[in-house]
Amino acid sequence: IICITGEFSEERPSIQRKLEALGAVCKTGVSKKVNLLVIGDGAGKTKTTKAAELGVRTEGRDWLIQALKSGGLELADNGMPSDEEMADL
């Protein structure tokens, strides 16, 4: 179960769809059920603080790119799989 916070080069709903295609479950808030918080640029303190309090693992953009790569998706120039590649899943 993954939660995403902050800004990325792509809209969050698009990133969530790509992660869900790889088997992730995406949530909008941090709770004890969340396994991972992916942190982008300019992330607020609310989610990061809550993750620290609950002992939720945190990762950044590099982790996200690697996760998408290991799922067999080629990356577009912006570091995310293109919509066309997602349509092929």
Image (tube, rainbow, N blue to C red):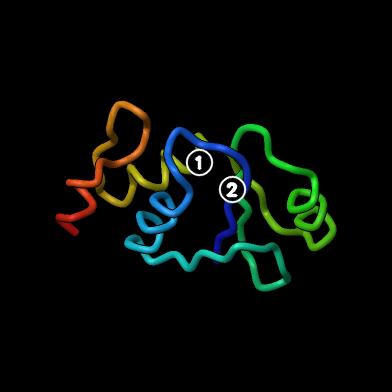
Q: Is residue 88 left or right of residue 78?
A: left
- Label 2: element kind: strand
Q: Position of residue 12 (x, y in %)?
A: 48, 49
Q: Residues within 10 Å of mark 1 (few under 14, many from 20)?
A: few
Residue receiving disc 2? 38
Q: Is residue 74 left or right of residue 41?
A: left
Q: Above or below — where is 65 with respect to 3? A: above
Residue 63, disc: 1
The residue furthest left is: 88
Cα separation, mark 1 vs mark 2, equals 8 Å
- Label 1: element kind: helix
Residue at left offset 50%, top offset 34%: 62
Q: Nearer the viewer, residue 77 or 57?
A: 77
Q: Amino acid at mark 2?
A: Val
Q: Position of residue 38 (x, y in %)?
A: 59, 48
Badge nearest the viewer, 1 or 2: 2
Residue at left offset 51%, top offset 64%: 26
Check if mark 1's residue and mark 2's residue have beta carbons within 8 Å: yes
Residue at left offset 37%, top offset 32%: 79
Q: Position of residue 8 (x, y in %)?
A: 51, 36
Q: Amino acid at mark 1?
A: Trp
Q: Residues within 10 Å of mark 2 (few under 14, many from 20)?
A: some
